[in-house]
């Protein structure tokens, strides 16, 4: 039998249902445009029926609702209620993560008093300060540097060139991508006699379990207490989180977001790309800020969608944008009315 998975096997793995040939063997997963006769492709939402029908894929992963509506193409189908989640599981089956060997590489530098679980992997040229704790199945890749008293929870994965300052904590199963910096000094200065004097930042940074932080992002340490990223939150590349910030559980921070010092994000907050949150602002649970928004005041209403500079209710912002697009024609109409009024006044003066 060719290497791959039968559709019925994939259905079992995701709790889905097969329509058509359950013995059809899938050897890979590809996009609609590039899939071939032995590939599984996918449609995660409606509106792509024509592309799916035209695809060369031998089988398709589609939402149950698409099949119920009669919109599914005529070929073997794998039905699921949660296509995006199911796609993630299937890709994982075809591309399993290779676990590096356990042990400490000969070139690693390990400080005094460190506790390293025997199942952990410490890669080449890793530097661990004194009294670090590395849990079970942790993977610390090449050239990672961690200061004194850092902690890595079980199953955490740390990619190359990540830097952790002293006393930083990384939760279980957290993923830190290349170039992440945790625990750098917060941006705090006092102006005295025309000189910016540094305020010592002596707190710490805590990243809870199942957090993922993208490449080249930074989370600063707190002034006195802690900067915290809540469990399950995901941070994209090139994101800045300032000192004393509190990020709730399962938040999403998209690329180039900036969160200023002492801001608080409730659970499930979503910040679109290049949006920003001002210092000391509180953002309520489930609030969604559109890309490039500037959240300059606290938002208490749960689940509110906001946009603009300054950010406000999304519906109101859309109306404002629509009015702005009409400003040119409105200005022309005003000039016409002014001219007519002037002409009428001139005639009245003559009478």
Image (spheres, grey):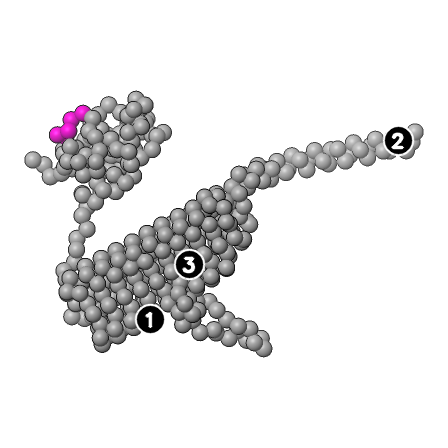
Residue 348, label in figure: 2
Mark closer to the chain start, 1 or 2: 1
Residue at disc 3, secondary structure: strand
- Tell me if mark 3 has few (under 14), some (14-19) or many (20+) residues whose alpha carbon lies within 10 angstroms of its own: many
- Tell me if mark 2 has few (under 14), some (14-19) or many (20+) residues whose alpha carbon lies within 10 angstroms of its own: few
* Figure check: 189 above or below 83: below
Foreground of the two, 203 or 129: 203
Residue at disc 1, secondary structure: loop
x and y percent of residue 277 in the render? 48, 54
Residue 55 is drawn in which quadrant? Answer: top left
Foreground of the two, 290 or 130: 130
Mark closer to the chain start, 3 or 2: 3
Task: Judge whether residue 22 is colored magenta.
Answer: yes
Q: Residue furthest right?
A: 351
Q: Is residue 2 left or right of residue 319?
A: left
Magenta-colored span: 20-24
Mark closer to the chain start, 3 or 1: 1
| Residue located beneath label 3 in the image | 246
Foreground of the two, 105 or 261: 261
The label nearer to you, 1 versus 2, is 1
Residue 32 visible in the snapshot: no
Separation of residues labelled 1 and 2 (CA atoms): 83 Å
Which residue lies at the image location 19% right of the left edge and 34% below the top edge? 11
Residue at disc 2, secondary structure: helix
Task: Judge whether residue 195 is colored magenta.
Answer: no
| Secondary structure mainly formed by the magenta segment | loop
**Cβ atoms under marks 3 and 1 closer than 8 Å:** no
- Tell me if mark 1 has few (under 14), some (14-19) or many (20+) residues whose alpha carbon lies within 10 angstroms of its own: many
x and y percent of residue 66 in the render? 31, 27
Which residue lies at the image location 28% right of the left edge and 29% below the top edge? 64
| Residue located beneath label 1 in the image | 166
């Amino acid at each position: 039998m060719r290497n791959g998975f039968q559709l019925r096997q994939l259905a079992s793995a995701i709790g889905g249902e097969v329509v058509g040939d359950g013995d059809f063997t899938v050897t890979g997963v590809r996009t609609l445009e590039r899939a071939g006769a032995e590939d599984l492709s996918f449609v995660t939402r409606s509106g792509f029926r024509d592309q799916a029908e035209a695809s060369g894929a031998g089988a398709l992963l589609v939402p149950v609702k698409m099949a119920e509506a009669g919109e599914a193409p005529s070929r073997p189908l794998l039905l699921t209620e949660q296509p995006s989640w199911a796609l993630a599981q299937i890709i994982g089956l075809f591309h399993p993560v290779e676990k590096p060997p356990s042990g400490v590489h000969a070139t690693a530098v390990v400080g005094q008093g460190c506790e390293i679980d025997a199942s952990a992997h410490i890669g080449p040229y890793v530097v661990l300060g004194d009294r670090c704790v590395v849990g079970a199945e942790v993977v610390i890749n090449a050239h990672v540097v961690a200061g004194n008293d850092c902690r890595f929870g079980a199953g955490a994965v740390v990619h190359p060139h990540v830097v952790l300052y002293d006393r930083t904590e990384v939760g279980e199963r957290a993923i830190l991508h290349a170039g992440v910096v945790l625990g750098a000094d917060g941006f705090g200065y006092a102006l005295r006699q025309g000189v910016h004097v540094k305020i010592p930042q002596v707190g710490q940074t805590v990243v809870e379990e199942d957090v993922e932080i993208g490449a080249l992002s930074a989370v600063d340490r707190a002034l006195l207490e802690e900067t915290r990223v809540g469990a399950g939150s995901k941070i994209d590349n090139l994101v800045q989180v300032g000192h004393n910030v509190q990020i709730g559980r399962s938040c999403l921070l998209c690329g180039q977001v900036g969160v200023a010092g002492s801001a608080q994000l409730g659970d499930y907050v979503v910040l679109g790309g290049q949006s920003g949150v001002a210092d000391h602002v509180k953002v309520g649970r489930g609030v969604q800020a559109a890309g490039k928004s500037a959240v300059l005041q606290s938002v208490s209403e749960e689940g509110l969608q906001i946009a603009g500079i300054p950010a406000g209710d999304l519906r109101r912002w859309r109306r404002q944008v629509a009015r702005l697009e009409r400003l040119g024609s409105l200005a022309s109409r005003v000039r016409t009315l002014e001219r007519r009024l002037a002409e009428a006044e001139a005639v009245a003066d003559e009478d």
